[in-house]
Amino acid sequence: MKKIVMLFAIAAVIGFSTFSWAGKDLKVGFVYVSPIGDAGWSYAHNQGRLAVEGMDGVTTSFAESVSEGPDSERVIMNMARRGYDIIFATSFGYMDPMLKVAGKFPKTVFMHCSGYKQAKNMGNYFGRMYQARYLSGMVAGAMSKTNKIGYVAAFPIPEVIRGINAFTLGAQAVNPKVEVRVVWTKTWYDPATEKEAAKSLLDVGADVIAQHQDSPGPQEAAQERGVYSVGYNSDMSGFAPKAHLTAPIWNWGPYYVDVVKQVRQGTWKSEAAWPGLADGIVNLAPFGPMVPKKLQERVLAKKAEIAQGKAKVFEGPIKDQQGKERIAAGNVATDKELLGMTWFVDGVIGTTQ
């Protein structure tokens, strides 16, 4: 399953690496679960690859639309056999296949996105996208007139649930009356299905559509109905310029460049990385022209507070849909709690099934 979140707390460092290619040209490979033209998840990772491609002495290659399971093992194995020095695999279902290949190529560095397993020559990484989700929720909550926001979501896993909760908390921070209605598509990339799901939410009064999907389908549905949308993964404003308010987006370039530099310098180590706004890995897309200046300033001020650690997204008191206190006043959710989140906050309409 693509992009399912790490189920364990961030792991301790396994040990310092002996991987160093000082003065040697590097070959870096990337494996994607969908086409790079999806405008979403794989597109964002490929933008990171292009940043690596621009480094001196580095060449890159990629394989797109690689199915999880045996097919991914074959692709990763072929890259290792062809002498790639670093291989990035960007879907959760690549974890076990990559771990298997890593055991056969101890001098190759393997990096897995969104998983939790490690080896001496295999690390994992993800990003605190919930921080940007909160900010986009602030925009959506302020722009809604019906106080009903629709959220087209992929799969009911902690990564997605955590994002919906963060988005809802952000919306409630500026509009306490707002509710967020969730529809599950059980897809990562299916433009037609995602667009129809958005329409079903519009039919019950939603006037802003948000998403945890890889296509611009939900935003196109919003524009066709004359309402607003919040995207995901990349700036998709070109697909729905009259609807697009902003989007929580990925910026993998700095992270990928840093990993390659570490390998070259001999400082790379296997670890579980979870960077966020402060590291530039997650961000907000530019605001649409319909977003008032004062609202933009408020959101950007909160962004700075979160990046500086002065504000926390999941700080109590926070109750779930049944009114049960999940995070007490003055407490902040731990990474372990965030990584295993399976409940909705109060204000979300929908189930976690």
Image: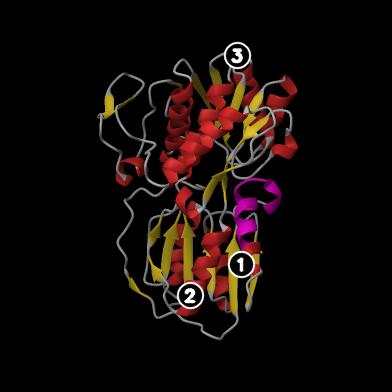
The residue under label 2 is 263
Query: How far is disc 1 from disc 2 in space, using C-alphas?
Result: 13 Å
Please give left or right for residue 165 compared with residue 288 in the image: left
Is residue 276 in sight in this rendering?
Answer: no
Query: How far is disc 1 from disc 3 in space, using C-alphas?
Result: 44 Å
Q: How many numbered dots are placed on residues in this image?
A: 3
- Asked where in the image residue 212 lies, by quadrant, the reply is top right
Q: Is 219 rendered above or below residue 54?
A: above
Which numbered circle lies on residue 52?
Answer: 1
Q: Are marks 1 and 2 in contact (CB under 8 Å)?
A: no
Which numbered circle lies on residue 205?
Answer: 3
Which of the colour schemes (rainbow, by chain, secondary structure, one colour) is used? secondary structure
Is residue 43 located in the magenta-colored stretch of the structure? Answer: yes
* Type of amino acid under label 3: Gly
Q: x, y (%) of residue 41?
A: 60, 48
Which segment did they paint magenta?
36-49
Is residue 268 in sight in this rendering?
Answer: yes
Query: Callout 1: few (<14), some (14-19), or many (20+) C-alpha neighbours within 10 Å?
Result: many
Which quadrant is home to the C terminus?
A: top left
Q: x, y (%) of residue 197?
A: 62, 26
Who comes first in sequence, dot 3 or dot 2? 3
Relative depth, front residue between 250 and 193: 250
Q: x, y (%) of residue 36?
A: 68, 53
Rendered residue at 65%/25% (across/down): 228
* Type of amino acid under label 2: Val
